[in-house]
Amino acid sequence: MPSDRPKEKRPFLLDFFPLEGPEQTRLSRFFDRLREGRLSTTRCSKDGELHWPPRTACPRCHSEELDWVDLPETGTIYAFSAVLGGAPLGLEGDVPFSVGLVDLDGASLRLFGRIDGRPWTDLKVGGRVGVEPYALEDGRVFYRFRALE
Ligand SMILES: [Zn+2]
């Protein structure tokens, strides 16, 4: 059955990336800062708790007095996996690709994300990665890791 829907538009429920504007999320500063090349998150100004993902209120003390802080731009692969088939709709053309958990240098945070820059067969636990913004086709931005070695 023919569809009038533009092929580049994905159904909303299959959109893996968050809406980023200030009218859509109170965390729009995260995306603004990412567009400037700065991966950042929130830190509670009351108890110093560092959050990931960024928050609008501290999960520990419920304070809404949070500061934005930049995160380290490098880290170490804690674990990774390869997507070799059965990729989600819209990502079929990217197969094979890697995703993993990365411990950021000097921060007690372990982030999940895609790892680019090397075939999955060349990645290793303990391998070094950098963090970089990734521009989506529709103008939004997200982050990805890039293998450094
Ligand atoms: Zn707090």
Image: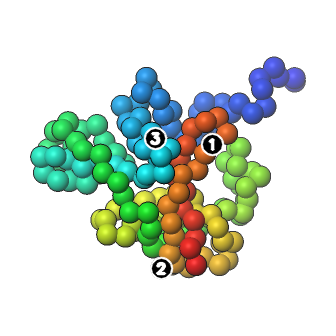
User: Which tag, 1 or 2, sits closer to the chain's start?
Assistant: 2
In this view, the mark in front (2 or 3) = 3
The residue wearing badge 3 is 31
* Label 1 element class: loop
How packed mark 1 is, by other alpha carbons closer than 10 Å (few <14, some 14-19, many 20 or more), is few
The residue wearing badge 1 is 136
Disc 1 Cβ-to-ligand 1 distance below 8 Å: no
Colouring method of the image: rainbow
* Label 2 element class: loop
The residue wearing badge 2 is 126
Task: From the viewer's perspective, tell me whether residue 9 is left or right of residue 140.
Answer: right
How packed mark 3 is, by other alpha carbons closer than 10 Å (few <14, some 14-19, many 20 or more), is many
Most foreground residue, 12 or 25: 25
User: Which tag, 3 or 1, sits closer to the chain's start?
Assistant: 3
Would residue 52 be seen by someone viewing this image from the given angle? no
Residue type marked 2: Gly
Gap between marks 3 and 1, in whole Å? 12 Å
Would residue 102 be seen by someone viewing this image from the given angle? yes
Q: Measuring 53% from the left and 47% from the top, which residue is drawn there? A: 142
Q: Measuring 44% from the left and 63% from the top, which residue is drawn there? A: 73
Residue 98 lies, in percent from the top left, at 62, 64
Residue type marked 3: Phe
In this view, 73 is above or below 39: below
Q: Measuring 30% from the left and 51% from the top, which residue is drawn there? A: 69
In this view, 107 is above or below 66: below
